[in-house]
């Protein structure tokens, strides 16, 4: 799961990023509305945490523009104002939920998980292949009923392959989805992580290599 944090307060942005990482989520950070729109149009996110009061373009306009473009990524709006007017406006233009600042860490994570559950309810979250059970909702993997521990990045790679089972997932798609925008991953970075994933799963055959293009799981 990859989340975009759009918050101009750098300290709060970094704090949210740390909280997400502790809870197993990958994230990118944007600090104004223009940067947010650029990220959203060029990268794929599972959730957007969007502050209302932003430089250049405010959060309301960012939300409206992405909805007008048909982008249906869940949006959790942050606001310093606990007013019905602001909440109604945000919900009317396409926000999915609201969180008033200051907020408790537990509530932030609970709302994020609720939004992800809501949007993933139409997806298959339990996938069984051979002697594996992949629980995508709870981010767990079992082989012969024994749990295998994966880092957030390795699980992200595995999830992309499972969500697109039978289809090729390109290097570019994996880099987009599973790496921070500031990491500058390469194809070799992806190959190294696939190698580590295969080693951790103790399985050389599950993930198929499509030479020069990417990977897939049948």
Image (cartoon, rainbow, N blue to C red):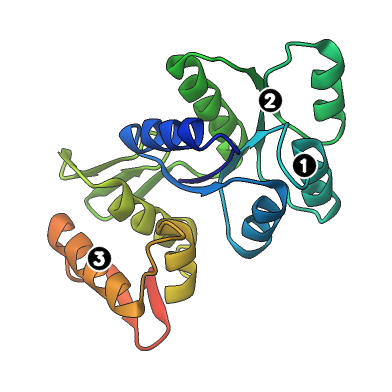
* Quarter of the figure with the C terminus: bottom left
Ranked by sequence position, the earlier of labels 1 and 2 is 1
For this rendering, which residue is in front, 184 or 148?
184
User: Helix or strand or loop: what does disc 2 sit on?
Assistant: strand
Q: Is residue 168 visible?
A: no
Q: Is residue 180 above or below residue 63?
A: below
Could you give the CA–CA distance between mark 1 and mark 3, rounded to whole angstroms?
34 Å
Q: Is residue 144 left or right of residue 48?
A: left
Q: Position of residue 32 (x, y in %)?
A: 66, 46
- Disc 2 residue crowd, few under 14, some 14–19, many 20+, Cα 10 Å: some
Classify residue 129 by image quadrant.
bottom left
In the displayed structure, would residue 126 be above or below residue 95?
below
Q: Residues within 10 Å of mark 1 (few under 14, many from 20)?
A: many
Give me the C-alpha separation between circle 1 and circle 2: 12 Å
Q: Residue at x 83, y 12 (%)?
A: 84
Using the numbered discs, state the Cα–Cα distance from disc 3 to disc 2 in whole angstroms: 34 Å
Q: Is residue 82 visible?
A: yes
Residue 97 numbered mark, or none: 2
The quadrant holding residue 202 is bottom left
Residue at 50 percent across and 16 percent down: it is: 107
Foreground label between 1 and 2: 1
**Which residue corresponds to mark 3?**
193
Pinpoint residue 46: horizontal percent, then vertical percent.
Answer: 56, 46
* Vertical order, 13 against 57 (above or below): above
Query: Which residue is outermost to the bottom?
Result: 212
Dot 1 corresponds to which residue? 63
Whole-percent x, y for residue 82 in the image: 73, 11
Residue 153: image x %, image y %?
Answer: 32, 53
């Amino acid at each position: 799961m990859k989340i975009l944090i759009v918050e101009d307060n750098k300290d709060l942005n970094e704090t949210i990023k740390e909280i997400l990482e502790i809870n197993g989520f990958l994230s990118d950070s944007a600090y104004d509305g223009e940067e947010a729109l650029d990220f959203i149009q060029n990268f794929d996110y599972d959730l957007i945490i969007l502050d209302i009061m932003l430089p250049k373009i405010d959060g309301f306009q960012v939300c409206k523009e992405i909805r007008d473009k048909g982008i249906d990524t869940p949006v959790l709006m942050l606001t310093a104002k606990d007013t019905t007017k602001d909440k109604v406006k945000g919900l009317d233009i396409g926000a999915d939920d609201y969180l008033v600042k200051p907020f408790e860490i537990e509530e932030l994570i609970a709302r994020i998980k609720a939004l992800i559950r809501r949007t993933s309810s139409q997806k298959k979250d339990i996938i069984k292949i051979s002697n594996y059970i992949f629980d995508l909702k709870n981010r767990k993997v079992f082989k012969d009923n024994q749990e295998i521990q994966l880092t957030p990045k390795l699980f992200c790679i595995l999830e992309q392959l499972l969500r697109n089972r039978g289809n090729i997932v390109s290097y570019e798609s994996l880099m987009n989805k599973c790496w921070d925008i500031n990491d500058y991953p390469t194809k070799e970075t992806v190959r190294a992580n696939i190698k580590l994933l295969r080693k951790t799963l103790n399985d050389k055959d599950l993930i198929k290599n499509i030479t020069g293009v990417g990977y897939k799981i049948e």
